[in-house]
Each structure stands twice: as C-alpha cells, then as structure tokens.
Image (cartoon, helix red, strand yellow):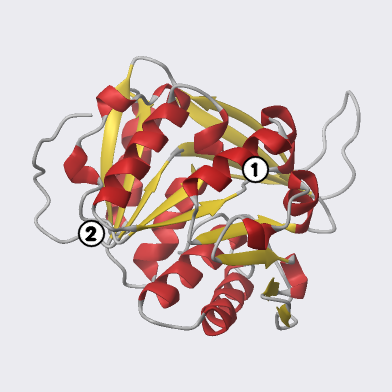
Amino acid sequence: MRALGGRYPRQVVIVSIGDLVLDVRIVPQGPLQPDDDTPATITIGGGGQAANFCAWTAALGEPARLVTRVGDDESGRRLVADIESRGVEVRAVWSAEPTGAIAVLVGPDGHRTMATQRGASVGLNPDDLQEAWFADARLLHVPAYSLFLEPIASATRAAIRVVRESEGMLAVDLSSAAGLRAFGPARMAYVLARMKPEVLFATEAEAATLAVPLDSLAQVPVLKLGASGCRVFGRTIPAPDVDAIDPTGAGDAFAAAFCSAWLRGAAPIDAAEKAVQAASQSVLLAGARPT
C-alpha cells in the first residue's frame, strides 16, 4: 500500500471496498420456457454491493468513497462515470481484465436469482491501494464478497488496518449464504472474531449458514428480515407494507441508512428504524440504486 495524497479535497466519512459491476436485470412476463422465448423486461445498469452501498450513502447526503478495480473497457468507464455522477468519489484501479457483470433474474414473487462474473474486481491487491484512500474514513464498509477470494481479501485486510490505525470503525455485511458456504462458515467466524467489526449485517440465511451467534462477533449485530424488517438486540423493527417492484439493492440501502444514522449518533434501534424505512422505499424502484 502506497502512502500518497489524493486529488479530492473533501473529507470522506464512509468508504467501501469491493465490486463495481454491470447489472443485467431480467423480469420475465411469465414462466421461462425451456428452448424457447419468454417476453421480459431487461434493463442494464450499475451494480455490485460496495458500489450500491456507496450510491445509497451519497443519496443520503453523506460523503462516500468507493475503492474498486474495474476493467479498462467501455463498461468500466461508463460505470465509474455513472456512480461519480451520483456524488460518489471513486478510486478505481484500472485492469486489463474485463469488468464484472451480474445477471439478476427477478421471479414473479419478487425473489431473485443471480449469476455472477466478478471479473476485474477480485484482482485488487494491497499494492494497488493508497493509504490516503482510507486514513480519513470514519467507517469502512466491507462486503464479505471482498473477503472470500484473493488477492482482494488481502487488500481489504490492508484497508482495515489503515482505518483501525486512524481510529475508524468497521461494518461488515455477510453478503451471500452461498459465498459463506464456499469460504467456510467456521473460517469466516474466525476472520470476523479477529476483525471485531462494530456492526455486522446478515440475512437469516447468512446467519444460519454462519451458525455462530452474531452478538459474539460484533458490537451491533443486525439481522435483516427482508419484508419483515430487521432485528437488533432481540427487538424486531417491522417494515411497512409496500407493493414491492424490485428488491435488488434493498439490503445496500438498508446498510447505508443504518451506517449514516449510527455515525450521526443514533442509537442502534433508531438507526435500524431509519434503515428499514430506506429499504422499504428502495423496493419501490426498479434497479439496485436510487434514481
């Protein structure tokens, strides 16, 4: 990691390290027909958990920085320009590898099936980073996707060390039950125990896969319950009834709103209430980011 200055003058409060990828969202008008056509609505836009988190954070009025690795290709350049236009400061490491992509198939019940090609993002390594990208962070948001594979996992650990040395805080999102199974639940529990995040976000499926009490791994464990809201310290915060259009990005909106409120001094329960409201509003939008 290089200790170099940056060209951005403003102070950054919240930083995330991880994926910026192309999202291809497919909403079929009926059941998919094997070996045949099915009419569908198909949209293309920006995605990636770290990038979506930053987009929602910026939409809440918080200074946000994304540290990522993308392909030096048309997709990568467009994705960086788009998220910068949303107020996110981007520190992009450009790669000869292609920019990643995610295909999101949205079923009639609103549930999603995702196929992921992470592309250039996983190649981020510690030598790509500059200390200045993290030294001013009050909070570093880490999707578990950024811990599952090397060399991005080593880069993420290096970023955490800089944030900790600067007395910043850490929020980890477990990201994916499938990713946890592939990485190893016991291994992830060990990693989290060493990192000691202040905040840990998990869905019910992710928490069940980890099979370790969340409150043993973080100061503030937050269990996301989807349309039912969330649970913090044994208290359930219900979500309002809404006619959801697309749940993609709702978890990222939730995490962004929670971290923003928490950093501004809200108690965890109050931060969770704001997070549930933000997620409930996000599902009324098509796509993973605020419009």
Q: Secondary structure at mark 1?
A: helix
Residue 45 visible in the picture: no
x 23%, y 53%: residue = 166
Judge whether 98 appears above or below 279 on screen. above
What mark, if any, has residue 238 been given in the picture? none
Closest to the observer: 184 or 151?
A: 184
Q: Residue furthest top?
A: 96
Judge whether 203 appears above or below 66 on screen. below
Q: Which residue type carries mark 2?
A: Val
Instruction: Identify the residue under disc 1.
Output: 189
Instruction: Identify the residue under disc 2.
Output: 12
Q: Which image quarter: residue 123?
A: top left
x 8%, y 45%: residue = 7
| Percent of width and height locating residue 66 | 33, 47
> Which image quadrant: the C terminus?
bottom left
| Percent of width and height locating residue 135 | 21, 49
